[in-house]
Amino acid sequence: GTHGKTTTSSMLAWILEYAKLKPGFLIGGIPENFGISARLGDAPFFVVEADEYDSAFFDKRSKFVHYRSRTLILNNLEFDHADIFDDLDAIKRQFHHLVRTVPQNGLIVAPGDDDNIKDVLEQGCWTPVEHFSAPSGWQAQNLSEDGSGFDVYLKGEKQGRVEWGLMGEHNINNALAAIAAARHAGVMVHHAIDALGEFQSVKRRMERRGEVSGVQVYDDFAHHPTAITMTLEGLRRQVGSEHIVAILEPRSNTMQMGVHQETLAAAFAEADEVMLFQPASSDCSMQKIAADIGSNAQVFDAVDAIVAQAVKRANPGTHLLVMSNGAFDGIHQKLIDALELKSGRAK
């Protein structure tokens, strides 16, 4: 899918581990329950985070067609990787190639409310499908305001309640998908629910990097308008009316090509302030996006300038949310160091 692959894969690997199935895994991030991104494992179960990017310069098929999965989670589907694909239909074709690799005795887990995934499955699917976010399949009900608790239902019957440290409706959907996939591997639903209660998230997915004098610094991998929206909405539900500063580096190839320029401004609706970094070589105009956002948005061409402005304006109760799929010149530690200097806590 376009969003949530790393988190969902990490959840599934942890559920299988909790159930003592000793899975192997290959994940594009570091699940904090494991502290590593890959291992061979000691069982027939192996969790792979897969995406539609091409395999190699000599093999332009999407990587995921090589994996021959028995259980497949299709989390969502939007246009991405504009450096590889001309349009959304091209990505849908690759997703359908993937669907065709799943055997008849396998399982496809898919959202019940994603029209693009629905289009893919309607092209032809010969594998059983279980839906999440759908009354006929897996649902979450009785959600706490910030998403840190929810009841799990399957076909209208309550299976149990998840209480955990994550936030946001997107993570609830990730959890439902992971529970469904784990059940197909033989894990009892109540064991999967218990496992999620001990799930510790993934590095760089709303990772709290530090707190100085009441100012929180977060690191998130969001680099697509939908991901930015979901991340900010989740944080807003958790912190209420406290001040949120969103700091973005548009680093992905798709972002720098300007593909999301017309839709990016709306993604910052839940931020009180927005600080945008303008890369030297980019077809995406941060000035235009800032103008679309309004007076609470600023554009910077240097990381140190962002740090100086963010720290200057930060007060107890401020949340500095940094979003980038790269290192962003070490901005997270620079923010923490500057906040400590401001508060007199610097060593």
Image (cartoon, grey):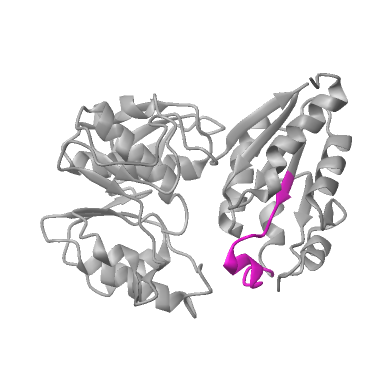
Whether residue 191 sits left or right of residue 26 in the image: it is left
The residue at the point 45 percent across, 26 percent down is 164
Taking depth in this image into account, of 6 and 269 the one nearest to the observer is: 6
The residue at the point 23 percent across, 45 percent down is 46
Q: Residue furthest front?
A: 347
Counting from the top left corner in percent of width and height, residue 289 is at 77, 64
The answer to whether residue 222 shows anywhere in this view is yes
Magenta run includes residue 226: no
Taking depth in this image into account, of 60 and 168 the one nearest to the observer is: 60
Location of residue 212 with respect to 298 vertically, above or below = above
Q: Residue furthest left?
A: 105
Counting from the top left corner in percent of width and height, residue 97 is at 27, 72
Taking depth in this image into account, of 89 and 17 the one nearest to the observer is: 17
Q: Quadrant of residue 66?
A: bottom left
Q: Quadrant of residue 331?
A: top right
The answer to whether residue 160 shows anywhere in this view is no
Counting from the top left corner in percent of width and height, residue 249 is at 69, 55
Q: Residue furthest bottom?
A: 86
Magenta run includes residue 250: yes
What is the total number of numbered labels drawn onto the structure image? 0
Whether residue 71 sits left or right of residue 265 in the image: it is left
Quadrant including the N terminus = bottom left
Location of residue 209 with respect to 56 vertically, above or below = above
The residue at the point 40 percent across, 36 percent down is 36
Magenta stretch bounds: 246-261
The residue at the point 64 percent across, 60 percent down is 251
Location of residue 253 with respect to 329 vertically, above or below = below
Counting from the top left corner in percent of width and height, residue 96 is at 29, 71
Quadrant including the C terminus = top right
